[in-house]
Image (cartoon, rainbow, N blue to C red):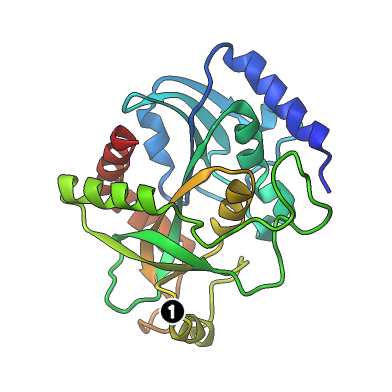
Amino acid sequence: MIPFEHYEQSAAWLCQRLGEFKPEILMILGSGLGDFGELVEEPVFVPYAEIPNFPQSTVQGHKGRFVFGRLAGKRVAVMQGRVHLYEGCGLEKAVYGVRVLKLLGAETLIVTNAGGAVNRDYRPGQIMLISDHLLLFPMSPLTGPNEERFGPRFPDMSAAYSPALRELARQAAAETGVHLNEGVYMYFPGPQFETPAEIRAARSLGADAAGMSTVPEVIAARHCGMRVLGFSLATNMAAGILDQPLSHKEVMETGEAAKYDFSRLMRKVLEKL
């Protein structure tokens, strides 16, 4: 278990680095979506490597840094890159940034990812508003002794993705003309892509998209009382839907192609918060 003092040390270092700036919204950007962080006004870039105790992101396409500043009139902390369970760090480290930003005062998490489309009606490049998630593996970032200073032993997950924020996202999509699907995201630990059989099982359970991130961060955010809004960019059709292999290169290329719609939608969402 990570000592609470480690989170405090990271938060204290960031407080000293940022001065009077207090982020109200944390945004986590998934694979291929990191360029959105370059839109932040008056940015302060802080590599994870400089922050005491902070875990490092090792995945290609993840810059591994925070961007602090203002966007659409809101004080934001943008994570350009995240840490995944498959990097060998453990789930507590995968959610470390969420907990540190909670200590800094952030009350809302906007989490994004690159996922595989399980729903056959979806197409690569489309964005899905996450309404709920599936976690069937015996793992949680809350495993072990509970840290009461973050939240209760048994946090409620019946509305993990804020209904009010989801309605706001629907309005933002309508106003920008960005096509927005809405559905259930299923978490797989990776790093291997899912098998066709796993995707068939996910579909039978009601999943519309699948990926290797997001759910641990959402659990940690809800545990410590943050509001959550989640989006999954369909960067490919999931395994077995098309007769072709999956690759991280395709994920990055689709993210690049979709960044204009993604940026318009995210900016409008921030304006409405």
Q: Quadrant where the C terminus lies?
A: top left
154 or 67: which is nearer to us? 154
At which x and y percent is residue 145? Answer: 84, 53
Relative to residue 191, is residue 260 drawn left or right? left
Residue 5 horizontal side relative to residue 41, left or right: right
Name the residue rendered at 36%, 49% in the picture.
164
Q: Is residue 67 above or below residue 21?
A: below
Q: Nearer the viewer, residue 196 or 128?
A: 128
> Going 70% across and 41% down the picture, which residue do you hit?
150
Task: Please tell me how crowded label 1 is: few (under 14), some (14-19), or many (20+) other residues with Cα within 10 Å.
Answer: some
Q: Which residue is mark 1?
A: 206
Q: Position of residue 54 (x, y in %)?
A: 71, 36
- Residue 117 picture quarter: bottom left
Please report the residue visible at 65 percent of the width from the left and 55 percent of the height from the top: 155
Q: Is residue 45 above or below residue 181?
A: above
Name the spot of residue 24 as percent of width and height, x first: 49, 29
Which residue is situated farthest in the top direction here? 19
Relative placement, left or right, of 115 versus 128 is: right
Q: Nearer the viewer, residue 58 or 190?
A: 190
Residue 198 horizontal/vertical position (percent): 53, 83
| Residue type marked 1 | Gly
Residue 57 to residue 191: above or below: above
Q: Residue at horizontal 37%, vertical 82%?
A: 241
